[in-house]
Every structure is written in C-alpha cells, then in structure tokens.
Image (tube, rainbow, N blue to C red):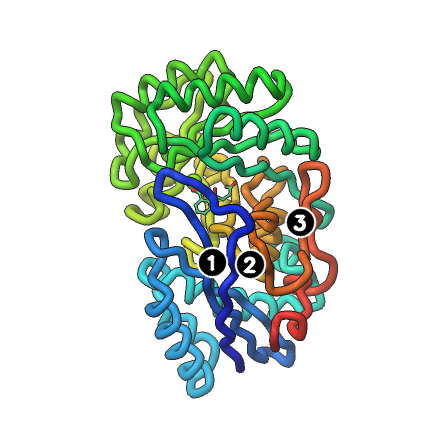
C-alpha cells in the first residue's frame, strides 16, 4: 500500500475567473485488491474540493481502515461531499484493480458495450486578451480540434463578447464554441452575454452565475445558447442539479468523489434529458485516464474537457491517453491502462 505525494507545475498557468491555476499537487495511491494492483490519484483543487492537508489526512485514515477492515469500510468512510478528491483516489484504485481482476478496460467494466476507440474532446483556451485568445483558438483548430472552450469572466461581458467574436471570425462556422464563465456574472450581465453570444453560435455557457444560483441558471438559456452547470455540484446535490432545467452538466470525477460517481450521474443526466460532459480539474495522468474511461462509457458522448495534459509541464508518466485530431484514444489494456510501476507502485 503506497501514498506518494507529487507536485506538478503547469506549463502555462490557466487563467480563470476563479484565479490562475499555477500547479497541481496530489497523491498517487496504490494497493492490491482481488489479486490485482490498482492505482488511483487524489489531486484536490481548493475551492472545488478539500484542501491538500484534508485530503492527505482522509487518505491516511482510509488506508489504515483498508488494512484493518477491508475496501468497503475504507470507501464508506470517505464522504464525496467533504473529501471528494481523497474518495476519488481510493475509488479509482479499487476500480482499476476490479477491472484488471476481471480482465477488461475500465470503460468496459462500467459498460460492456462501451466505446473503446476514442472520445471527442474540446480544447481549453485560457482567459487572456483578444489577441492571445484568438491565437490559441486558431492553434487548437490547426491541431485538429473542432470544439473550443473559452474561459471567460475575468474581464467585462463586453470584452468577453469581443473575444468570442474574434475567435468565431478566425475559426469559421464549423467549429463549436463553448464559454466557461466560472460563476463570474450576475443575472443581468449573464442575460447580456447570452443575447450577444446567440448570433456568434456559442453552444453553451458553463456556470455563467454563482454556484449557489441554480434557479437563475434554469431561467437563462435561449434557443441558441444552452446552460451547463459545473460549480453548482459543489453547492447542490446531484439530484438537485439534475432537477434544474439546464442543458448540460460538467462532471469532474475529482470533484464528484470518483469515476464511479461521475459515471452514475452521467447516466442519470441522460435519463433527465441533460447532456453529460466529463472533464478534469487539470489532473495528472492516472486521473485523466480514469476520466477518459468514464467518458468512453457514455454512449455517443459530446466533446469532453479532457485535453488537459499539455497544461502540465511535467507528469507522473508518459501520457496514457494522448490527444490526436480532437480525440483521445481510450488507453489500451485492462483497468485504467496505466502501468502501476510507472507511477510509483
Ligand atoms: O473543461 C475543460 O476543457 C478543462 C477543465 C477546466 O476547464 C477546468 C479545470 C480546472 C478547474 C476548473 C475547470 C472548469 O471547467 O471550470
Ligand atoms: Mg467549468
């Protein structure tokens, strides 16, 4: 049983309305279960999950419980609402070992009919000046992405509209454009943004309003521009979010307490007529691989926010799920498709 701490600087800090993400710190956990070794990753993002210290404390206790009373007791002790990243770490290692023991890729462990080819992904474009946003958007399209997600909300709504207008003019009409405001707007600003985005063909805006304002989101969408909830999962239960009249939900396994929770909520979202989109919190290789398997287990999934490997200057291992032509190949092999030895087991 291991718990290895890591720090990974970002190659270029990601500017968001919550501030800049400069580095990611977390833990790789590994243990044997059902005769197979499983690995997991707990990479908390304060503001979204527990702190690094709380994560470490929860993991340490869970590993002790695991040794004394087994895997179910350890998992039960980890509350997805209070220590989601720690729960993600332990749950991922268990799922990896389970799928390995059963001789299937994790995506197929979730759904025997899962896609094991590749999943579509969006490029993530930081909240920078008009010129820099447009340059990054064009570079992503040149790299083969046909879906872009532009971070917004640092500047005025008018400046963000200008950024979107410039990107649309640069990439043409065949590219999907999403916007992520990370909760930066009040209801009035959001209404102005939605009106201006409609003729620019923005498909949806992620979290235009603060996480607490679920009702405001339900009232915001128009025929052209949809509404997606992301931070709302930090303030409301999944059932409450799925009961809201929104178009999409952003499912971050690291925030929801693990890949299994994310997969379950994705399936429930589909039943409610809400489109699930799986994303990372700029996670390291183990958690990215897990998130790719979750996305692959969602039939005909929309482009997901999983193309975040390049945001990191360094990683735990070679990228198990590289991006090519706007898609990520589902890792080969049983379980996560990550060699435990490569990540410190
Ligand atoms: O969805 C993506 O394209 C990448 C992930 C992303 O944007 C993100 C990364 C870290 C923290 C928050 C967010 C977010 O979606 O708001
Ligand atoms: Mg978001």
- Give the residue at x 40% y 41%: 230
- Give the residue at x 59% y 59%: 314
First in sequence: mark 2 or mark 1?
1
- Give the residue at x 67% y 71%: 342
Q: Nearer the viewer, mark 3 or mark 1?
A: 1
Crowdedness near tag 2: few (<14), some (14–19) or many (≥20) residues, C-alpha within 10 Å: many
Q: Position of residue 204 (x, y in %)?
A: 46, 27
Distance Cα–Cα, label 2 vs label 3: 23 Å
Q: Would you say the residues marked 2 and 3 are in contact, meaning their CB atoms lie under 8 Å apart?
A: no
Q: Is residue 176 left or right of residue 3?
A: right
- Quarter of the picture holding the C terminus: bottom right
228 up-or-down from 194: above or below: below
Residue underneath mark 2: 284
First in sequence: mark 3 or mark 1?
1
Using the image as rendered, state which of residue 333 and residue 73 is in the foreground: 333
Distance Cα–Cα, label 2 vs label 1: 8 Å
62 up-or-down from 312: above or below: below
Using the image as rendered, state which of residue 80 and residue 318 is in the foreground: 318
Which residue lies most toward the bottom here?
Answer: 68
Tell whether circle 2 marks a residue whose Cβ is less than 8 angstroms from ligand 1. Answer: no
Q: Would you say the residues marked 2 and 1 are in contact, meaning their CB atoms lie under 8 Å apart?
A: yes
Q: Position of residue 309 (x, y in %)?
A: 60, 50
Crowdedness near tag 1: few (<14), some (14–19) or many (≥20) residues, C-alpha within 10 Å: some
Secondary structure, mark 3, is loop
79 up-or-down from 218: above or below: below
Crowdedness near tag 3: few (<14), some (14–19) or many (≥20) residues, C-alpha within 10 Å: many
Residue underneath mark 1: 24
First in sequence: mark 2 or mark 3?
3
Q: Nearer the viewer, mark 2 or mark 1?
A: 1
Residue underneath mark 3: 114
């Amino acid at each position: 049983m291991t718990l290895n701490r890591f720090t990974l600087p970002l190659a270029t800090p990601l500017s968001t309305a919550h501030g800049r993400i400069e580095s990611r710190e977390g833990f790789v956990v590994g243990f044997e279960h059902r005769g197979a070794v499983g690995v997991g990753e707990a990479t908390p993002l304060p503001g979204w999950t527990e702190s690094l210290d709380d994560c470490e404390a929860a993991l340490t206790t869970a590993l002790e419980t695991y040794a004394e009373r087994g895997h179910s007791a350890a998992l039960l002790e980890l509350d997805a609402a209070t220590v989601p990243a720690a729960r993600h770490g332990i749950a991922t290692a268990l799922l990896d070992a389970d799928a390995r023991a059963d001789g299937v890729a994790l995506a197929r462990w979730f759904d025997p009919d899962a896609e094991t080819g590749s999943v579509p992904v969006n490029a993530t474009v930081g909240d920078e000046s008009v010129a820099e946003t447009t340059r990054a958007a064009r570079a992503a399209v040149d790299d083969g992405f046909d879906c872009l997600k532009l971070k917004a909300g640092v500047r005025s709504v008018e400046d963000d509209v200008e950024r979107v207008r410039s990107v649309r003019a640069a990439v043409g009409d065949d590219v999907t454009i999403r916007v992520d405001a990370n909760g930066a707007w009040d209801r009035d600003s959001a209404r102005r943004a939605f009106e201006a985005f409609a003729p620019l063909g923005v498909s949806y805006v992620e979290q235009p309003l603060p996480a607490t304002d679920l009702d405001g989101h339900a009232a915001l969408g128009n025929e052209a521009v949809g509404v997606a909830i992301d931070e709302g999962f930090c303030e409301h239960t999944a059932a409450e979010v799925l009961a809201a009249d929104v178009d999409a939900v952003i499912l971050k396994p690291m925030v929801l307490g693990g890949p299994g929770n994310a997969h379950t909520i994705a399936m429930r979202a589909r039943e409610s007529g809400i489109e699930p989109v799986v994303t990372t919190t700029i996670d390291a290789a183990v958690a990215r691989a897990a998130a790719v398997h979750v996305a692959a287990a969602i039939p005909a999934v929309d482009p997901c926010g999983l193309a975040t490997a390049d945001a990191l200057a360094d990683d735990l291992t070679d990228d198990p799920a590289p991006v090519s032509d706007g898609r990520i190949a589902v890792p080969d092999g049983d379980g996560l498709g990550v060699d435990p030895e490569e990540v410190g087991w």
